[in-house]
Amino acid sequence: MQDFTHTNLISISVVAPMRDEELCVLEFLRRTDAALRALGRTYEIIVVSDGSTDRTESMLRASAVEYPALHSIFLSRNVGQCSALYAGIQATRGEIVVVTDGDLQHRPEDITLLVAKIEEGFALVSGARLNRPESTVLKLIPSRIANWLLRRVTGCEVRDMGGFKALNGDIARSLRLRPGQHRLLPALVHMRGGATTEIGIQCQERFAGTSHYGIARSFDVFFDIIMLGFQSSFKARPLYLFGRIGVLLLTVDCLVMPWLLYEKFFHGVDMGTRPPFLVAIMFFLSALFFLAMGFVLELLTDANNAIDGTKPYVVREHVPSESPSKRSPTR
């Protein structure tokens, strides 16, 4: 098994997950390699076969001679686009990482535009797809709704979250992507403090074959947005969310119980069978549950971040101190 390391950094890495794309793979390699050679920089093309069952993997093996920059990764089974993309990103060595689809809906020639823009100092540049040749009902409308929700819950102003992207290599490799989060890359980078922007690119029909996605994916995106909204609102601190719910329930409980006790001792009204008393007990137990849940999730989050080495920030620039040899002599 070939071991990809991050030593000997190169300029540009292109990552493309593929599943059963035998009709697209050769044309993808030809155009992508030509676009990267035209830039005149060192580069690599990493194609991740996500459990392909057609001739995709055999064609990639055969293409290794013609394209020395090609690195192919074959996953043992189909794990989904996000996990395949994550595997490819972790294998990159590029100072700039470009992620794209393998069906040529994204023009490899537009890599030049993304690279030029990211070198202005951005952590991520998103390709905003123009004139998308896709079904309005099945794809365009759900996509626009999802992008609008993402902008609302995360504050990231990128209008097209999915698709063609260029990222700072170090930031790309530092991301720990969970299934489904490949559609949220701009929001994830923005939440960590990275500068994001977008430029218009042309979106084409698939070169060949059929799409692997349908309307059912919209429901998955909705749940991903909910999860990201919680992380954005409470800064990945579960205690902030569950603690506030617990305190709210305790506050209601503290208002109801004194009233019930007053009526019992001063007016002789039995409180044991009254609905407000039962609600107050339920609120009290629920408050304890939410507070305990917040503490437990807080400890699990800390443990997970410690194991993964995840950092909640992005360093934009290092400014070294002036060396003693360059300082003007004191008088």
Image (spheres, rainbow, N blue to C red):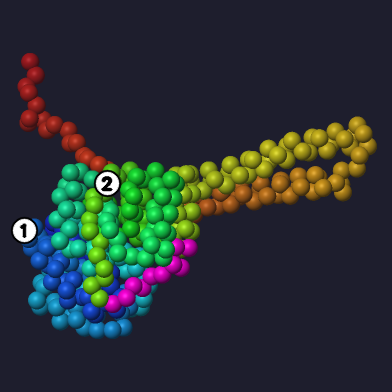
For numbered disc 2, what is the local secondary structure?
strand
Number of the front mark, 1 or 2: 2
Q: Is residue 230 magenta?
A: no
- Vertical relation: 107 (above or below) 226: below
The residue indicated by pointer 2 is: 197
The N terminus lies in quadrant: bottom left
Q: Which residues are magenta?
A: 209-219
In front of the other: 184 or 175: 184
**Is the Cβ of the residue at disc 1 closer than 8 Å to that at disc 2?**
no
Q: Residue furthest top?
A: 331
Residue at (46, 49) in percent of width and height: 229
The residue indicated by pointer 1 is: 40
Q: Residue 194, image x and y in percent?
A: 30, 45
Q: Residue 74, image x and y in percent?
A: 27, 76
- Dominant secondary structure of the residues highlighted in magenta in the image: loop
Q: Residue 45, image x and y in percent?
A: 17, 67
Q: Residue 185, image x and y in percent?
A: 33, 55
Question: Number of labelled discs?
Answer: 2
